[in-house]
Amino acid sequence: MRIIVLFIYILFISCSSKKKELKSFVNMEDSCNNKDEHILPGKLAVTNSQADSCIIYDNSNIGKARFKIGRFNDTSFDGHTWMNMADDLVALENIHDKNSNIRKANLVKTDINNNFIEHIYKVNNGEFAGNAHFTKDDSLLLFTIDKMGDRQKNPLEGLMRMNSLFVMDFKSRQIVKKIDSVGISPIFSLRESPWLYDGSSFIYSINYDNGIANSIELNEKSTAPGIYIYNMAEDKRKLLIPDAYFGICSPVDLKIAFKKNQSVYYFNLSDNSTKLIYKAGKNEKVQDIHWTPDGKYIYLAFYDFKFSDILFDSGEKLIDIETGKEIPFKKITNGFQSYSWK
């Protein structure tokens, strides 16, 4: 009897698998034949750490180039971000010790094949540069540096380092602004496209709503959560959008997209108005959001917890920021990776 039940179960799984394969094939064929689907515009550099590679997309859903970012002797690379005025990239050069631990991370300039061009900023041992972000004209470069602390005092030191912000005049390679102790990772967050499109200010987020942050003592939560804006000319920062996080600036105007209560909004600095772009479904959790280079859409990656907190699916959506409508597009299935888009 048990053998018969087992046989029926295996037959059911086999048939279900065949149906999924057929459905997948039909969907793929429909996708190829659907001429109304948008192609994601612009050039993307997607760092896929799991695949140990960076993939370049150029106005296509098919990768134009791919290069290895893993170990090269005692060095590895990641965090590739575009320069805007040239097809070169700024990346993190991780220097490893004999135990494979990263002992420091410099900023370097590479071409789109990851060939080294030059060092941009060298750090001392125990210091780690973070992802770097250019103004639209490449005149200023914004990046973070955090320092290795004492793990005897704090076992979570590797996950909770204090960050400082640096702004570099890229032509002279001089640091023109430094803001010390701006926030602890992962409470502090500097996302893709932190510069306003005119280069006058940049934004970052303070967010306590995560597992590691919940373990931090209350006296270290003195900075109010939300999105902060720092004006370069005035040399001042202020809380711009309370309780919001994951702030990213539009590449074409003064809009700032952000997440709040599992919905996506934009804040318009021109008139201080806020507009809902996308409200997550009952079982959805929006993970990452990105502006398209034309400023018309928000590309988002999400988890769909259909059955439980353990069993979930994932997907990508392209949302028109003015209508809130979902736009059909050719997916690239790399929504949860590190992005740089121009």
Image (tube, rainbow, N blue to C red):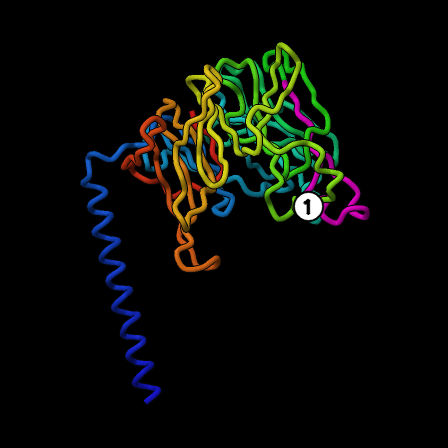
Q: Residue at x 52, y 33 (%)?
A: 246
Is residue 153 a member of the stretch shown in magenta? yes
The C terminus sits in image quarter = top left
Is residue 287 a member of the stretch shown in magenta? no
Q: Residue furthest bottom?
A: 1
Nearest the camera: 134 or 92?
134
In this view, 269 is above or below 258: above
The N terminus sits in image quarter = bottom left
Q: Amino acid at mark 1?
A: Asn
Badge 1: how crowded within 10 Å, few (<14), some, or many (20+)?
few
Visible residue check, residue 13:
yes
In this view, 280 is above or below 268: below
Q: Residue at x 21, y 34 (%)?
A: 36
Nearest the camera: 36 or 28?
36
Nearest the camera: 296 or 58?
296
Lateral position of residue 61 relative to residue 229, left or right:
left
Question: Residue 2, position in %: x, y?
Answer: 35, 87
Question: Residue 28, position in %: x, y?
Answer: 24, 47
Nearest the camera: 189 or 39?
189
Q: Which residues are magenta?
A: 146-167
In this view, 95 is above or below 199: below
Lateral position of residue 110 relative to residue 7, left or right:
right
Residue named by callout 1: 101
Question: Residue 284, position in %: x, y?
Answer: 42, 47
Provide the secondary structure element on which disc 1 rests. loop
In this view, 295 is above or below 18: above
Lateral position of residue 16 relative to residue 255, left or right:
left
Question: Residue 192, position in %: x, y?
Answer: 51, 29
Q: Residue at x 74, y 44 (%)?
A: 217
